Image (spheres, helix red, strand yellow):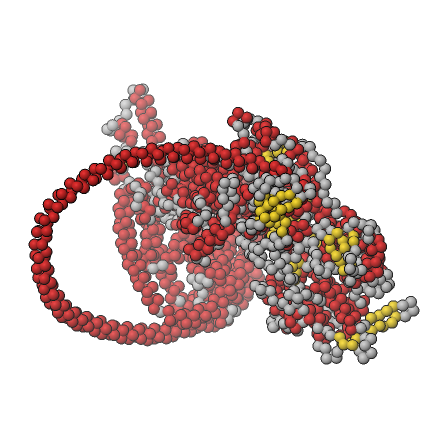
Amino acid sequence: MTSKELYTKDARVWVRDPEEVWVGAVVTKDYNGKEVTVQLEDGTEKTIVTKKETDLPPLRNPEILVGENDLTALSYLHEPAVLYNLKMRFINSQAIYTYCGIVLVAINPYEELPIYGNDIIHAYSGQNMGDMDPHVYAIAEEAYSQMCKFESNQSIIVTGESGAGKTVSAKYAMRYFAAVGGGSGESETQMEKKVLASNPIMEAIGNAKTIRNDNSSRFGKFIEIGFNRQNTIIGANMRTYLLEKSRVVFQAAEERNYHIFYQLCACYDSPEYKDLALNHPDYFYYTNQGESPVIDGVDDADLLDDTKEAFTLLGISEPEQAMIFRILAAILHFGNVDFIETENQEGSKIAPEDESLPVVAGLLGIDGGQMKKWLCNRKIATVNEVMVKPLTKTQAFHARDALAKHIYAQIFNWIVGKINKALHTSVKQHSFIGVLDIYGFEMFEVNSFEQFCINYANEKLQQQFTQHVFKLEQEEYVREQIEWSFIEYYDNQPCIDLIEHKLGILDLLDEECKMPKGSDANWCQKLYEKHLDKSKHFSKPRMSRTAFIVHHFADNVEYQVSGFLEKNRDLVIEDHFNILKASQFEFVAALFRDEDKSSDYHKPRSGRGSIRSASGPPLKSGSKKHKQSVGSQFRESLTKLMTTLNATTPHYIRCVKPNDLKQAFVFEPKRGVEQLRACGVLETIRISSAGYPSRWSYPEFFTRYRVLMQQKHIDKKNIKHTCEFVLNKYVKDPDKYQFGKTKIFFRAGQVAYLEKLRADKLRDCCILMQKRVRGWVAKRKYVKLKRSAILLQCQIRGVLARRLARHLKETRCAIRIQKTWRCYIQHKRYNRLRDFALAVQSHVRGRTARNRFQELVRHSKAVIIQKHARGFLARKWYALKRKQIILVQCCIRRQRAKKELKQLKIEARSVEHYKKLTRGMENKVITLQQKLDEINKENKKAKEQEGKLHDLEAQVKVLKVAEVKAKQSSNKVVDLEDEMTKLRRELEETKREKASLEEHMSAYKKEQKEIVEILKEENGMLKESLQQADTKVHLLEELQKDKEHKDMENQQLRKDYEQERGHHQKLVNDYSRLEQRYENLQEELRLITSSPALKHRRTPSNVSFDPKAEMALDALLLQPTSNSTSDTSDIDRDILDQGDEKVSMDSSVFAKLQKRVRELETENKRLLNDLEGLETPMSSRSRSSSTTDTTTDTELASTSKLKSYEEENHKLRQEVLKLKEAFLAFEQNKDQDAPIRTLLNQVNVLNEENEKHRREVINLKSKLANTKRDRQTGGVSIGVCTDHNLFKKDPELMNEDGELQIAFLTQRQTIQLLEKQLQAEKKNFSIQENELKEELERLQKDNYRQQKIIAQNLQSTPEAKTSATLQHEINRLTNENLELKEQMEVYEKETKKLKKQLKLAARRLQTKGVELDIPGDTSAGLIGSPDPRSGGAFSPSIQRKDHVFMGMFAYKAEDEPRLVKCLITDFRPKQAEGLLPGLPAYVIFMCLRHADYTNDDMKVKSLLSGVVNGIKKSTKKRSDDFEIITCFLVNTCRLMHNLKQYSGEDNFSSQNTKKQNEHCLRNFDLSEYRQVMNDLAVHIYQGLIKCMEKKLSSMIVPGMLEHEGVAMVMGNKPMGLRSRTTSISGEDDPVRKVTIDTITKQLNIFLAVMHSQGLDPQIVTQVFRQVFYLITASTLNNLVLRKDMCNWPKGMQIRYNLSELEEWLRSNRLMESGASETLEPLVQVSQLLQVSKKTEQDIESICELCTKLSTQQIIKILNLYTPVNEYEVRVEASFVRKVQETLRKNRGETEPQKLLMDTKFSFPVTFPYNPSSVELDSIAVPDPWDLKFLEKV
């Protein structure tokens, strides 16, 4: 279109304004080619003369495009459009972020906004950049996702002037990386904390308050955040650039020094910093120049704590922190060092009364005199000598400040190095994301060296930015294959060459610095000579010869050359360095020694740890080495930075400062335009507008501009052809657009033109519709008026006629009415007077009666009050007296208890004294024993040994008497023994009953029923007694509350108990020594076993008759007895050596155990003697018969004896270990009865085991003796001759007739026969031994269980003892009943089998003609069973019915893993199709019932633990399989319900059938496991929700928001360069195919699976309530972060989608589940988008309507609301403010401020009790489940 067509009347344009920069105007006359007449917004008219088309005012964009997220979406791209769009978004919508192509423009709001929380991070994580509203998190997510996807390094470049918010933006970007790049391990989490902890440190030492910003970064930094291949943070690195050192010594008005100084001064009164001699900031010269020591809202003391915490986290130790603070305090005191002129005024000196320099010397550890000297003097080195030159006062001040700046720079660099070291990692870095926070373009009234370096850096960054933008534009055109011409853009390379190339500004500056007499003026003249009139980027000011102008890309900047050389040299006197190097503090000395090592910064370094502050070290005067200048260092570091950035994919954030007054949401256009030009945003716009800035995908263009198409030209199969037809029709110039592969590219202004055409078309359509509708309305109105007129005439005429007739009637009736009325009035008056008189009388009489009644009432109440008051006083007096009496009783009882306790202690000590007296007697016994052993070795006199043994037994009896006396002093032990005796008698009676039951098998059932009935009656009585006992317990508890004042006495008793408890540890040591004795005994036995005498097995072929060997064997057999006795004596001696003071009440128990051990040893000794006595006659006989038998018998005897000793010692060792465990439990649990119970149990077990073992040994010995006797009698006839004379005869006589050979053969056969017999006997003996061992183990288990019950009973009440005993007997009888039943079943099977055989035999005999003499019926006789009472005759038997299934499965313990594997680990839901829901849970519970039925607690615990662990592992392993998780949830809930249903509790069993109550658990209370199952069900439920969330999360936003299910002609607005991913996707993109039907189909799948698995309906409703909450939260969170979704059509679309979901709920009968209530926020959002937003009534309706939305959400949606069409009206900012005020007024300040809904929120889940009607005996296991090892019971 031509200019005349564009600039017509009513066209909207922008006009320049000196204050607002640009103001809006409307063209009042068509453009005539020479001038344009416009009317401004204030009503004034203005004529703009145009000499060429570029002078025409810029056109304004359509109102529909204003406020877009991306500036490139604007049709007209120019400066006023960008400025206006940013202003509208910032002020009206309070949107601080806006895209401008690839750049994110961030405007500082000067207010804390709730848009940086973790919920916002979660919302932006994983989202494409164009899908959400602009945000710094979106840029960070783009960088992170590109790094993950392409495995390439990324960088985020944050620029802007001071106060624009660069540091905050960089900080939030780093926070985002730490959140999304965090690993699961502890080390990664620590690294993220370290990365974030570097921020407070760098802000403290590198940030300061300026006029423009309270937290301005005075240095540049580039942070590299390293990631590994898993894209988690592993480390980081930091480079710093150009620290503003001058701020250390000078601050302008209203500015501050670095924050760290004020943080230290804020804590000057703290004792921790007393040594630093700090004071208020106003006291120090370096902190009081700006006269603004405090920042509003900032607490420097708290910030110092944060800084110290960050120091610690980054590995800076406490001593290092202390040295840092000492150096910083020294810098502050350095500023207070003052100089005065000398008398000749040629030098300077420090005043003697100066107090600051000694403080500095003390803090730095340097020589104060040296520093005082060289602060006022300097050395000058000549060829022959070194002279000392005094410094003037000014020079001294400069030298002081230079040293202070250098010290601060060094400590700054050291801290940066420590941070890098802490962030360094040894793990290989795969990729990194760099965050560059650097100063923006600066231009002040006076610009110096710092501004020059900053602007130089921005020139380099702008060049890189421009090239990158141009590259992206070019790649886009090439990718879409469109024709394009080269785009001209501003190239600032000549300006960069002017600064950094040879003979450039920096080169000439370095050259002048090397000159001995170089000056700023000389350098300026050289610049004029080299570059003036030769470079277009260099010029000279008109009125100055000490300044120059550089034409930068942003603006022309004038630099004052004063101070350039000094700042570039950065001189510090060398003597100052030497003084600092000689510091007594190693930290200070190393700080400046390390500087020399790292001074050559131009040399390359390798390794990540070598990165350091890019500002580099300063130069020192007098140094011979070549040092780089500050400018050269900065140039090289900048070159390295650009190299790094060029190797990454850059992302840009441009920070803008809206105003200089730091006012919230105030935008100054002048400041905004300056910064937009300086940061390159306008250059980006210019490059974009030079090409094809507006881009539409074909589907979007078709949808948006379909109204411009005719139906006959629409081809939905070829949308591209349809779009081409439309553009060819309406846009005649083909250069205004280009068709790409997937997009249409438009020149600037074409989209606005198309929008105008579309709006005109819609307007014409509206006018046509209005015409038709208005005509129809007018015609309808006319017809209605005509009908109304005719009807009205008829009605009026009828009314007039009726009115006349009514008048005549009324006149006649009036006279009659008057007569009657007058009579009525008189009668009414009379009645009124009479009634009044009666009323007065009644009121007076009533009042009199009421007064009298009230007086009587008051009198009666006074009497009642007196009665109660007197009663209360009497009761109070009684209660007081009663309390005093009780107190007196308590005191007396306490005194008596103390006396009794004291008496018990005295008795205990007397017993120990008696033991002490008997100690000498035991020593005598030991002496006698030793003498006895010597006599035994010499002559083996058994009689003397027996006599001494009798003496020892007498002494033991004496000890027993003492022990009996000790036992009598311990009432508790006596009671326990009595109780044990009583229980043993009951057990013996029970055994006799068992024997009688076995004898009377036939009458067992009747007796059992009678016993069960009796037990039930007794159980009922016991329950009643238990209830009474409970009542008594409650009364006792109430009484116990009244005795709380006795706590002090109890505490004293506890202290006494603690003293006594310490003695238990000594007992543990004693037990360990006892165990060591047993180990020694076992070792001796092992030596006996391994002795050569026993290993040498004798056979008949090597028979020996040496009597010495037999004597040696006897000695070996006797040796263990003496060792045992000596060990016992040693044990007694050890116990007695403990002393009286360490022996407690438990010593009697330990002595009892010790006595039992001695008895066991004595018993073993006696058995050994008996064995020897048996072996003596046997050996004499065997010598006369056969040496073979002697050897074999001896070996058998010794072997059996050794085995018995080994088994006995093994058992004793186990008992000692149990005692140790009991005492350890005592020490841990503080249970004072645990050791006593354990000791008693061990004693009882030892008693019974010894008795059984003794009987077993006697039986075995008797059998062995019989066997030997049989062998001896059998061996007489075939034995070998033992006559020695036989061998002395003549050999020929012996071999006469071959007798010798025959004898040899006979002997060999005999030997073989004996060996076979011996092997057979050994085999039989081993079989019998194994059987006896099994029987012994069973009896031991039974005994252990009984002892355990006894121990429990001893601690319980008598009623509980009786109940437990009965319960134990019932369980025992039940087990025996089961065993007997099994035996009876076996017998019955055998009987049936025999009966069948008898029947067959009888039939065969009858067929052969043999008659059987069987009385009665044959079958009856065969079936009959003998009756012992009838003398052996047969009696008819009772027929047994088929077995009844008891509803339980029996399995073996080793089959438990198979059971868990089949029902849990390898179970698949398909295996349960068509079966009972929760069948695996039923099977598991039936197995559990059998374990309960058999009273096997270990089996119950093992099965339940295996089930729980198996379910947890399976759900964790298959967490993505919805069907499996549902199956496990169903079975877990069913198992939990079964545990409740069959628990036997009344509240659960009330709904059971009679048979179900019979199947209840009998022996175990599994209420704790019910809670475990409930927790497991909650865990599985949460996994189910997560699985559903994972499947639905990718569908919610496309289906609920992005898909347009309602056919509309609105379409989408242009989205700019960063369009939505779904917008640019093709038709085949699966995201575009997601609709609301897709979501409902997925919900149907979920519901079908739940129903098929049989999940409880109550749980189903809770699941879908949670799922619908997730849909609501995800949809709402996405909507409030996307401006393109906040419009009227989208509200209608959301309402349609919600109606579909509600219909789904109704169709599936889930409306009552609460899911529809979770959709209420979305319903209100859709209504908010569609409601009117203009008047006060609209405000009230919005506040009443949006009750489920927070204030922030409502305001956010109203701010984001954007019309899609021009006929829609925007929401005014004033309307939004009124809504906000009304909401705050109505809801108050207590409302939680939240913008996003918590997607992680979950409703509390409950599992209502759901009993099953299925009876357990009707359940069968399917064959395919492979559970054949389960047996029905």
Q: Where, quadrant-wise, is the N terminus in this rendering?
A: top right
Q: Nearer the viewer, residue 1734 or 947?
A: 1734
Q: Nearer the viewer, residue 717 or 1268?
A: 717
Q: Nearer the viewer, residue 1203 or 1467?
A: 1467
Q: Residue at x 30, y 62 (%)?
A: 1032
Residue 65 in view (yes/no): no
Above or below, 626 relative to 29 = below
Q: Residue at x 70, y 66 (%)?
A: 250
Q: Residue at x 66, y 33 (%)?
A: 735
Quarter-wise, where is residue 400 in the image? bottom right
User: Would residue 1766 be found to the left or right of residue 455 on screen?
Assistant: left
Quarter-wise, where is residue 113 in the image? bottom right
Q: Tell me where residue 1025 appears, x and y as whole percent.
A: 28, 57
Above or below, 1134 relative to 718 = below
Above or below, 202 relative to 1315 = below
Q: Tell me where residue 612 appears, x and y as whole percent.
A: 73, 56
Q: Tell me where residue 1647 appears, x and y as whole percent.
A: 43, 37
User: Would residue 61 be found to the left or right of residue 1727 on screen?
Assistant: right
Quarter-wise, where is residue 1478 in the image? top left
Q: Tell me where residue 845 appears, x and y as whole percent.
A: 11, 67
Q: Where, quadrant-wise, is the C terminus in this rendering?
A: top left
